[in-house]
Image: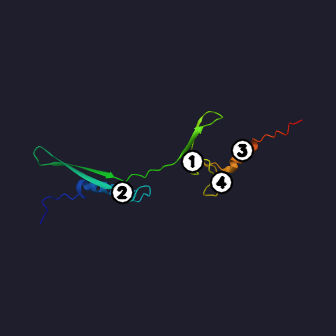
């Protein structure tokens, strides 16, 4: 027995609808495996077929729209320290790396750093250059 309505989606428009669906499925599964999204969030693909018959109802244009709804990327938060530089009056802002303002920490390479990630040895070298020997000029 032959089908009275023979319109397989995979064959319509010379396979273009199936090709578009495959393209969207690839994006959907990449989103599922993205560690920056919530695994449990729902994703969706909607296939919309719109039929527009002519005046005589003999030919029908079929327009296909495939839309994709992915899981959102997770929010990322951080803390920023900000203030005004006393020396030049300019506003500064740097990310807090240590977790607590004023608290030093060790990075992954065990380098000791300030709360905003500046290596301590760099600061010590700069401060050693600025040492003023007040005893030198005593008479």
Q: CA distance from mark 2 to mark 3?
A: 51 Å
Q: Residue 60, how many percent across, how many down?
A: 16, 49
Task: Tell me the number on the disc at residue 96.
Answer: 1
Q: CA distance from mark 2 to mark 1?
A: 31 Å
Mark whose residue sits in front, 1 or 3 = 1
Mark 2 crowdedness (10 Å alpha carbons): few <14, some 14-19, many ≥20: few
Q: CA distance from mark 3 to mark 4?
A: 16 Å
Q: Give the residue at mark 4.
A: 112
Outermost residue, right direction? 139
Outermost residue, left direction? 56
Pointers 2 and 1 in contact (C-beta within 8 Å): no
Q: Identify the residue shown where x is 61% and y is 49%.
A: 115
Mark 1 crowdedness (10 Å alpha carbons): few <14, some 14-19, many ≥20: some
The earlier-in-sequence mark between 2 and 1 is 2
Mark 3 crowdedness (10 Å alpha carbons): few <14, some 14-19, many ≥20: few
The earlier-in-sequence mark between 2 and 4 is 2
Q: Give the residue at mark 2.
A: 41
The answer to whether 60 is drawn above or below residue 1 in the figure is above
Q: Give the residue at mark 3.
A: 126
């Amino acid at each position: 027995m032959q089908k009275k309505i023979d319109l397989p989606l995979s064959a319509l428009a010379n396979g273009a609808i199936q090709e578009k669906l495959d393209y969207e499925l690839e994006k959907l599964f990449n989103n599922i495996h993205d560690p920056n999204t919530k695994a449990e969030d729902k994703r969706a693909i909607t296939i919309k077929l719109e039929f527009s018959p002519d005046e005589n109802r003999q030919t029908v244009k079929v327009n296909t729209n495939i839309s994709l709804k992915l899981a959102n990327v997770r929010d990322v938060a951080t803390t920023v320290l900000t203030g005004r530089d006393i020396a030049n009056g300019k506003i500064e802002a740097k990310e807090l790396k240590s977790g607590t303002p004023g608290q030093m920490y060790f990075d992954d390479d065990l380098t000791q750093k300030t709360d905003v990630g500046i290596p301590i040895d760099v600061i010590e070298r700069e401060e050693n250059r600025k040492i003023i020997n007040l005893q030198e000029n005593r008479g």
